[in-house]
């Protein structure tokens, strides 16, 4: 049997310029497009033995699933869920960690026309209640974790809509064991008709401020990730891609399923809860991972723990997103590995908005250029486009094409919709500037910009300087109210092992920043902490630090 063409070619039209760089991109989406039937089942029909998923865990267990197996398991799981009473439009929360069961389960929900709500295993009972009540969740499918299942049962007592609980790998009172139930089912599952405009997946954003908002994407959403996987992560047909992400957050959709499979690339999953750099890199080496994507936190730890300790030889391409990555880290990574980390930027509400796409020259510290899928502008507070070099907010401007990749709305939250969408323009809340060549440079969240003595100071620039000091493992820059200056710059710092906070070290760090940036930007206040508050996706919560300072 000849190898099939990757299906991204069926569902999109690409125009490539010099160096294979993507200059124009159009999605070709059938009215009834459904990723589970039209991609997974189609690959299974043509190439059933092609590898879809390579999974291993900390204990050394391993599971390799082909598209044929993934198709059959998802059909059986869809039948089991259907027999339990789940149908098109139902909202189902999925808390399956990095277990391989996540993949056939979410495909089963897609086949049923249900709305999947991936969630992290770190949620408390109160968090689950908030999500269930806000989104009208009727079922939860959970991992075999004592704490998760206890929280789910506690939440069910407060949530009348939550009528069905499923788990895997272990019998538990109050739960239907999904991996046992599907064994009784046939893999011949009749297609449930869905529209590409139906609600498909709902994410509660791990916002850096306030309560999480519920972001809804439709059934066309996977196709918008063709650019993410093929043209930014540069995944290869027959390759093995590893994105470091828990299935409970949007990055899993960016890097662990949709675009990768559309491009014919298998997905590597390392099932762990506590990140240990050496363990992750041992998996990369053992399975010959060919492309790698991780949040900046992971790259910082890899660099700080010594890149000479690891074997990167199988990795052909490396990317990062989630927050800006310090140029010094990119430079050190390149020196040791020969790999230039390609940055990307987007939100849970979108797919890749800006990126250093394949074939585009890198500019260290820049996010890249706008994706051809979107029309972006950087605007001032009066919505006028900013000239090159001037800071403003990144917005998504409507075009005459359908808005693929941009969420439908915030679920049941008209106030959030009104804040984000004005005159059809989507406001990201992120501040950046474009240089003369059109590269975007990240400054910070609009909420995080510090106004001190009339100056506007972006936290990332100072964080990038501080991280270069050998004593600093991680840091966050925030503004602290000050009667004279309005705000002063504060550094909250996690030190490398072997260093201790002291007035002498504080003075040294302040001088270090003064020498590298404009003198007014140095941190006048410094606090040493054991860890920084972060979202489940690893982003530093500047908002939480600011709140703590105001108490």
Image (cartoon, rainbow, N blue to C red):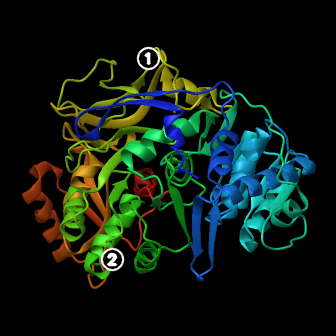
**Mark 2 vs 1: CB contact within 8 A:** no
Q: Which mark is residue 520?
A: none
Q: How many C-alpha atoms fall within 10 Å of the one at disc 2: few (<14), some, or many (≥20)? A: some
Q: Quadrant for residue 346, please give it.
A: top left
Q: Is residue 50 left or right of residue 361?
A: right
Q: Quadrant for residue 507, please give it.
A: bottom left
Residue extending furthest toward the front: 1
In this rendered view, identify the residue nearer to me: 422 or 58. 58
In this rendered view, identify the residue nearer to me: 189 or 366. 189
Rendered position, 6 above or below 284:
above
Q: Secondary structure at mark 2?
A: loop
How far is disc 2 from disc 1 in space, using C-alphas? 45 Å
Q: Secondary structure at mark 1?
A: loop
Q: Is residue 366 left or right of residue 42?
A: left
Q: Is residue 5 visible?
A: yes
In this rendered view, identify the residue nearer to me: 293 or 147. 293
Rendered position, 335 above or below 107:
below
How far from the left and from the top, in percent, is residue 228?
44, 43
Camera-near label (2 vs 1) is 2
In this rendered view, identify the residue nearer to me: 67 or 305. 67
Report which residue position mark 2 lands on.
Answer: 311
> Which of the two labelled residues, at mark 2 and mark 1, occupies the earlier sequence position?
2
Q: Which mark is residue 399?
A: 1
How far from the left and from the top, in percent, is residue 384?
29, 17
């Amino acid at each position: 049997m000849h190898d099939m063409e990757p299906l991204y070619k069926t569902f999109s039209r690409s125009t490539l310029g010099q160096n294979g760089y993507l200059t124009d991109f159009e999605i070709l989406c059938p009215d009834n497009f459904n990723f589970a039937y039209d991609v997974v089942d189609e690959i299974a029909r043509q190439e059933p033995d092609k590898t879809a998923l390579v999974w291993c865990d900390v204990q050394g267990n391993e599971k390799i699933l082909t598209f044929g197996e993934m198709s059959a398991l998802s059909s059986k799981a869809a039948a089991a869920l259907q027999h339990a009473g789940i149908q098109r439009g139902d909202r189902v929360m999925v808390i399956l960690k990095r277990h391989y069961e996540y993949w056939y389960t979410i495909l089963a929900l897609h086949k049923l026309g249900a709305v999947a709500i991936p969630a992290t295993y770190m949620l408390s009972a109160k968090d689950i209640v908030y999500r269930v009540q806000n989104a009208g969740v009727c079922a939860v499918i959970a991992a075999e974790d004592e704490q998760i299942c206890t929280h789910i049962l506690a939440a069910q007592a407060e949530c009348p809509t939550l009528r069905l609980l499923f788990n895997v790998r272990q019998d538990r009172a109050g739960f239907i064991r999904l991996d046992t139930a599907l064994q009784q089912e046939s893999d011949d599952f009749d297609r449930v008709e869905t529209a590409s405009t139906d609600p498909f997946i709902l994410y509660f954003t791990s916002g850096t401020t306030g309560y999480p908002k519920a972001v809804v994407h439709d059934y066309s959403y996977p196709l918008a990730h063709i650019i993410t996987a093929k043209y930014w992560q540069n995944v290869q047909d027959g390759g093995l891609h590893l994105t470091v992400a828990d299935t409970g957050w949007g990055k899993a959709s960016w890097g662990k399923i949709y675009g990768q499979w559309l491009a014919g690339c298998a997905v590597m999953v390392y099932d762990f809860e506590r990140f240990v750099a050496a363990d992750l890199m041992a998996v990369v080496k053992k399975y010959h991972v060919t492309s790698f994507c991780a949040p900046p936190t992971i790259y910082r730890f890899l660099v700080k723990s010594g890149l000479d300790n690891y074997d990167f030889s199988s990795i052909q391409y490396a990317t990062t997103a989630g927050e800006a990555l310090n140029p010094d880290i990119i430079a050190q990574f390149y020196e040791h590995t020969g790999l230039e980390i390609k940055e990307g930027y987007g939100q849970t509400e979108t797919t890749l908005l800006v990126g250093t796409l394949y074939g585009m020259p890198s500019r260290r510290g820049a996010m890249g250029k706008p994706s051809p899928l979107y029309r972006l502008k950087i605007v001032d507070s009066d919505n006028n486009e900013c000239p090159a070099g001037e800071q403003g907010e990144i917005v998504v401007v409507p075009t005459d094409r359908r808005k693929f990749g941009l969420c439908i709305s915030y679920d049941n939250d008209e106030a959030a919709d009104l804040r984000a969408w004005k005159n059809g323009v989507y406001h990201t809340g992120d501040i950046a500037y474009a240089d003369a060549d059109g590269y975007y440079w990240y400054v910070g969240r609009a909420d995080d910009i510090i106004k001190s003595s009339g100056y506007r100071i972006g936290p990332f620039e100072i964080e990038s300087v501080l991280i270069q000091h050998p004593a600093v493992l991680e840091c966050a820059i925030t503004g602290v109210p000050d009667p004279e200056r309005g705000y002063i710059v504060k550094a909250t710092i996690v030190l490398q092992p072997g260093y201790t906070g002291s007035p002498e070290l504080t003075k040294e760090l302040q001088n270090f920043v003064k020498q590298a940036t404009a003198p007014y930007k140095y941190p006048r206040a410094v606090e040493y902490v054991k860890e920084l508050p972060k979202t489940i996706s690893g982003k530093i919560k500047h908002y939480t630090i600011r709140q703590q300072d105001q108490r």
